[in-house]
Image (spheres, helix red, strand yellow):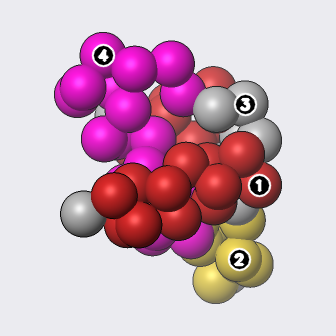
Amino acid sequence: MTIRQWARRYGARVLGKSGREVVYDFADLATIEGCIWRGDEVPLTPEGRDVLRARLVAAA
């Protein structure tokens, strides 16, 4: 699966466009990837992933 597929499937946060290319929030994509690799459920919204990321940082 590619980053574009993750972004589309999980509704990654879009920061803007550069020509025809879409620019995604790297932290949001990294959180999606981490959930996939850990086998965790990926939160459905970027805000849900923000909360998860904050929880993971606090636990570290």
Question: Would you name the residue on which mark 1 appears?
Answer: 47
Residue position for label 4: 39
Provide residue 30's location: percent of width, then percent of height.
37, 55
Please tell me which of labels 1 and 2 falls first in the chain.
2
Q: Is residue 46 magenta?
A: no
Tag 4, which secondary structure? loop
For disc 3, the neighbor class at 10 Å (few under 14, some 14 to 19, many from 20) is few
As helix, strand or loop, the secondary structure at mark 1 comes to: helix
C-alpha gap between disc 1 and disc 2 = 14 Å
Please determine whether, in this image, residue 29 is positioned above or below residue 58: above
Name of the residue lying farthest toward the front = 59
The image's mark for residue 22 is: none
In the image, what residue occupies the spot 41% across and 66% down? 58
Disc 2 marks which amino acid?
Leu
**Distance of label 4 from label 3 (alpha carbons):** 15 Å
| Three-letter amino acid code at the position of disc 1 | Glu
- The vertical placement of 19 against 57, above or below, is below
Q: Which residue is mark 3?
A: 44
Question: What secondary structure predominates along the stretch shown in magenta?
Answer: helix
- As measured in the structure, the alpha-carbon distance from the residue carrying label 4 to the one carrying label 2 is 27 Å
Q: Position of residue 4 (x, y in %)?
A: 49, 42
Check disc 3 and report its element: helix, strand or loop: loop
Q: Nearer the viewer, mark 1 or mark 2?
A: 1
Q: Which residues are magenta?
A: 25-42
Q: Amino acid at mark 4?
A: Gly
Question: Which quadrant holds the C terminus?
Answer: bottom left
Q: Residue at x 50, y 56 (%)?
A: 55
N-terminal label among 1 and 4: 4
Residue 35: x %, y % from top left: 38, 32
Q: Amino acid at mark 3?
A: Leu
Q: Position of residue 7 (x, y in %)?
A: 57, 42
